[in-house]
Amino acid sequence: MSGGGNLWATIWQMSWPMLCIMVFNFFVGLADVYVAGLISPETQAAVGFVSQIYFFIIILANAIGIGTLALVARETGAGDTAKALQTARQSLFFSLLIGSALTGLTLAFHREIIALAGFPGPVREIAEKFLRIFALSLGPNYVLIISNAVFRATGEVRKPLLTMFIVSLINIAGDFMLVFGSYPVPAMGYQGIAVATSLSVFIGLCVNLLFLTQGRWRRVFSDRGPLSPELIGKIVRIAWPAAVLQVAWGAGTIMLYNILGRLGDESIVAMASLTNGLRIEAVIYLPAFALNMAASVLVGQNLGSGDPVRAAAAGWRITGAGMLVISLMSVTVYIFAELFASGLTGNPEVIRETARYLRFNMLAEPFMAMSAVLGGGLQGAGDTKGTMWVIIVSMWLIRLPLAYALALSFGYGALGVWFAMVLSMTIQGCLMALRFYRGGWRSLAVD
């Protein structure tokens, strides 16, 4: 994939499978929430909350995946297959250990974790059962995430595409079959949603393990030696800023809800509008983060092959493509903001505020694409600290203080929060572009 050939063709070959995977994940989340809503509002609330907990639990897996991808992509670009195999082997084993440890901790403290939300009794009981079932799939899910990262790093993007298609199909079908029953499968009620997720992860892992017995990967499990502290240290040095970044972003979003919750009579409408707006924006994020993944691989591989000029060209070209696609989507949402808002709620006040949220935030979407794609390129080069600091500065030093001041101190309410989001995302995109342009990542040593 690196070191020659048509760069645009390579970008397309790397990007479209990633976009499909993002779409699969989107529909899985939609199916979980939809089926939960068919059961009861309590179930829907529990599913939403446990999904957020699960997101935080797998942050380590995603971070380890970024570290693994950066190393394997560079080793692949350098033609060092033996080293790439060693990195993949160590990372898979390390992720299994971490995932298994988290399974034990989650099972031991699931009641305390759920109690933090302060849910009433019926919702708490549902959420506790959900979390116990989800916990059993943590180890397999960690290995699934890392193995997908390994395949992406070597340009074998169709393998995770097939795996995640199977996972998504089983998850979505399982939601309906296991919850409501379909001969000969008995109805399991709300627990069927969690079982469907766990079952799909186990089967997806089996598919990836089968891939790892073929081709260049057939020797990946031949060396059963102990973990290498040196190699795991390299992965962790790249991974920990990525984990901090995800925590900072997730916690920052929670703080926005906290600010909106202080607006008195306006708070309910504002919080509902933020929820609806984020769901609509999630569709726009799909191509941006697909291109983020493509940029990670192409920048890493080209650095490994000793061609930083081509690596930089790949980053900028993918960014340009992302900004164009996202701009077109944003214009559509801007024009039809009320229509999109009315698809999620029938409340006239929420529709108006959601539409206002969308029209504000669509102005910053091209900068979101710039940040996402160039951030992926920096991570592929191993510069995870750079992306971490850009996100922390943008979220915690600009967005949140400005949102608090405008919404509460100066009395602009939700409008002040929306303005703070637009300004901070614009600055975030510019800071990420500046970091990439300066080029310190070209000579960054990841090993």
Image (cartoon, rainbow, N blue to C red):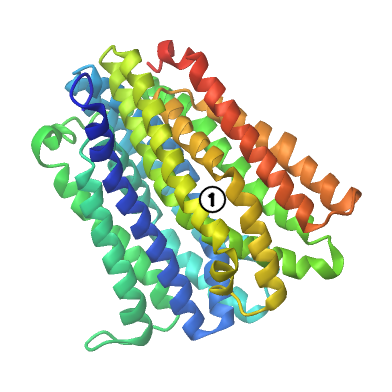
> Height in image: 150 above or below 332?
above
> Height in image: 95 above or below 266?
above
Nearest the eye: 364 or 168 = 364
Amino acid type assigned to the residue bearing label 1 in the image: Phe
Picture quadrant of residue 412: bottom right
Q: Position of residue 444 (x, y in %)?
A: 44, 14
Picture quadrant of residue 314: top left
Q: Is residue 112 left or right of residue 92?
A: right
Q: Is residue 359 left or right of residue 178?
A: right
Please tell me how crowded label 1 is: few (under 14), some (14-19), or many (20+) other residues with Cα within 10 Å.
some
Nearest the eye: 64 or 319 = 319
Q: Check disc 1 and report the residue beneath it.
A: 56
Q: Is residue 124 left or right of residue 9?
A: right
Residue appearing at x 54%, y 78% in the figure: 43
Residue appearing at x 61%, y 81% in the figure: 122
Q: Position of residue 174 (x, y in %)?
A: 31, 74
